[in-house]
């Protein structure tokens, strides 16, 4: 059964069980999937469905931040509950160690040596982390790793004369 069909079945089951939060959350997620299908005039693959659900989770995370800044803990808690419901349909999130290993592998595979190579590394990483890690977190880790590599190369370099000074 495809992820899209599984989402629809779970939505139906939640409707029958009377679980209002789960029902409403899955309806919103289904609506997002269905909207993309209508727009593109196609049935989404599992990978495309994961991308849509990941966007839904991301928008809810942003809402949680906004609600907390505004002192609306009740709404932030509701959004977090929705994130938990939708996240059940997404692949297991990568741990920090797994992310760090992937970042190292990406830098080695692309031959990146400075912060200017961020886009190249992210291009290599994106398909491998999609739906399993927040893009901002991945980008931050890559930026930090490239900065360390750049500093290490700079410190190891020959700095005798010829500088701008």
Image: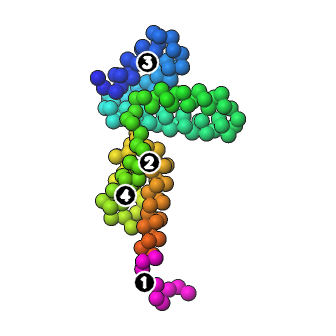
Dot 3 falls on a residue whose secondary structure is: helix
Q: Residues within 10 Å of mark 2 (few under 14, many from 20)?
A: few
Q: Pick the residue in front: 14 or 36.
A: 14
- Mark earlier in primary sequence (1, 4): 4
Q: Nearer the viewer, mark 1 or mark 2?
A: 2
Residue 163 is one of the magenta-drawn residues: yes
Residue 115 is one of the magenta-drawn residues: no
Give how far across and how far down residue 98 sits, in percent. Answer: 38, 48
Residue located 37% across and 53% down the image: 101
Dot 1 falls on a residue whose secondary structure is: loop
- Mark earlier in primary sequence (1, 2): 2
Q: Which mark is residue 96?
A: 2
Q: Which segment is the magenta one?
A: 155-165
Dot 2 falls on a residue whose secondary structure is: helix
Which residue appears farthest toward the front when viewing the image? 97
In whole angstroms, how far apart are the C-alphas of marks 1 and 2?
A: 35 Å
Q: Pick the residue in front: 73 or 12.
A: 73
In whole angstroms, how far apart are the C-alphas of marks 1 and 4?
A: 26 Å
> Pointer 3: what residue?
11
Q: Which mark is residue 15?
A: none
In whole angstroms, how far apart are the C-alphas of marks 4 and 2?
A: 12 Å
Q: Residues within 10 Å of mark 3 (few under 14, many from 20)?
A: many
Residue located 44% across and 57% down the image: 142
Which residue appears farthest toward the right when viewing the image? 71
Main secondary structure found in the magenta portion: loop
- Mark earlier in primary sequence (3, 1): 3
> Pointer 1: what residue?
158
Q: Quadrant of residue 12?
A: top left
> Pointer 4: what residue?
104
Check if mark 1's residue and mark 4's residue have beta carbons within 8 Å: no
- Mark earlier in primary sequence (2, 3): 3
């Amino acid at each position: 059964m495809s992820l899209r069909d599984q989402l629809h079945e779970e939505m139906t089951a939640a409707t029958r069980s009377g679980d209002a939060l789960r029902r409403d959350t899955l309806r919103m997620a289904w609506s997002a999937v269905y909207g993309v299908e209508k727009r593109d005039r196609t049935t989404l693959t599992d990978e495309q469905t994961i991308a849509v659900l990941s966007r839904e989770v991301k928008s809810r995370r942003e809402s949680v931040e906004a609600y907390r800044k505004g002192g609306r803990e009740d709404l932030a808690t509701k959004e977090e509950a929705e994130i938990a419901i939708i996240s059940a349909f997404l692949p297991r999130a990568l741990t920090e160690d797994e992310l760090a290993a992937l970042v190292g592998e990406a830098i080695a595979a692309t031959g990146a040596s400075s912060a200017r190579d961020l886009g190249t590394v992210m291009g290599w990483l994106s398909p491998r982390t999609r739906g399993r890690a927040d893009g901002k977190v991945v980008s931050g880790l890559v930026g930090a790793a490239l900065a360390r590599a750049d500093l290490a190369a700079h410190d190891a370099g020959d700095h005798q004369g010829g500088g701008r000074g």
